[in-house]
Image: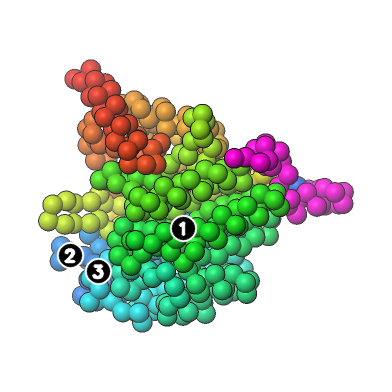
Amino acid sequence: MHVIPRILSKMAFPTLCALFLLSLTRISVCTSEGWILHVTDFHWDRTYTNRDLSCNGLVNTHGLYGDYWCDSPFSLIDVTIKAMKNATQGKDVDFMLWTGDSVLHTADENLSIDNNVGILTNLTNQLQQTFPTMDVYATYGNHDYYPNNQYPPHNNEIYNRTLEHWRNWINDSAQETNFLKGAYYTVKTKYGLRILALNTNLYYTSDKVTANMSDPADQFVWMESVLKQSRRNHEMVLVTGHVPPGVAAEGGKTWFYQHFNTRMVHILQQYSDVIIGLHFGHEHADTFRIFYGHSGQPEMALYIAPSVTPWRYKTSSATGPKHNPSFRLIKYDRTTGRHLDLVQYYMDLPESNKQNRPIWAIAYTATTDMGIPDLSPRSMDNFATRTKNPNGPEFQNHLKWRNANAEVMPCDALCHSLIYCNYMKLHEHEYKTCLRDTQQYTASILGKRK
Ligand SMILES: [Zn+2]
Ligand SMILES: [Zn+2]
């Protein structure tokens, strides 16, 4: 249902640049490319050096900057924010996306509203002090609520207290009402891009409060009205939030309750002509998903940024992968909103602990290191298609950087299929079909190598 042809609507994006063009003054502003800074999943463990509540009792010697079994100590938070600042030097960074999960992984008995709000407040202050003039669009993660995950479909103390600290960033009294109701809001950036900041934790299968609802906090109705208005106003929209729609590569289930996933994907697909990108966190892994149109053409890409926390999960039946701390910069065209490049940064945690200094580096630049000419849905689809070969450089590169080079896990036919299908299939039924088809193919390729 594209009322405005896709190309036309993207050309019509009204920006300051276009206004300058019309006035024929300061045309130099008009070639503009800007940058977006994205950080997610700090998971700050303030008890790291004493009770180490996030570490599952697995650590004896606590490294200065953290440990793969634990959430982030303050020393890691501190050097990450400084590294973010360094990375932005000399670049026109227009705004920051901060996609939640600031609170450590621990049982509810170790948490409280005061504890969680305290962590959010301290982190907000850290970011504001380091980036005093930067616009920041922040969203909650499932761990930021108390009790864990249980976001209610209405106003509560955590929203009220957070707004006191995020008010300057949201900077719109009408949107404060939305935030107080459901922790969602929309803001127009200074170059005309519209941010749609969602609270997708309301749809997460760990949230027992909203399970049987059709539209918790009326967020679906609201986001449709914002997208409709954006189409009318020829605005381009960037969607951001914490828990992404689509299927989790570990487990093959959607993160959302299925009825919520179906509705979210449907709404997004209806407005693929105005949505220029989607940015999420939660998975602690560097990955992406592609949304396809009715005739199979790639229409939107959703980018998932890896975490700051190095934490790996451990349950009685499974152990998660290690992660190196990460953040990213995304280059985009201010006029069209098109995403052009992605520079991923990471910290070598063991080496940093060994040398008592933070060792940050560029993990990769999408255009030059990954062979992705831009971040358009078509280019991401091309990349995803090339990862069908489990031995090819694209898939091997993905494996290396999926967890920010903390360790490259051996990846058999099932593992390869789980990841490959995860790029392309947003619903459980189609994901299962893809798994079956791809596994046979992958097994035959891996078999030939032997
Ligand atoms: Zn997280
Ligand atoms: Zn999360």
Residue corresponding to mark 1: 241
Is ligand 2 closer than 8 angstroms to the Cβ of mark 1?
A: no
Q: Amino acid at mark 3?
A: Thr
Left/right placement of residue 435 relative to residue 226 reads left
For the record, the magenta segment spans 1-28
Mark 1 packing: few (<14 Cα in 10 Å), some, or many (20+)?
many
Q: Quadrant of the C terminus?
A: top left
Q: How is the image coloured?
A: rainbow
Judging from the image, what secondary structure is the residue with disc 2 in? loop
In space, the residues marked 2 and 1 are separated at their CA atoms by 28 Å
Residue corresponding to mark 2: 56
Residues under numbered marks 1 and 3 in contact, where contact means CB atoms less than 8 Å apart:
no
Residue 435 position within the rendered picture, expressed as x and y whole percent measured from the top left: 28, 32
Q: Amino acid at mark 2?
A: Asn
Q: Nearer the viewer, mark 1 or mark 3?
A: 1
Mark 3 packing: few (<14 Cα in 10 Å), some, or many (20+)?
some
Residue 306 position within the rendered picture, expressed as x and y whole percent measured from the top left: 39, 52
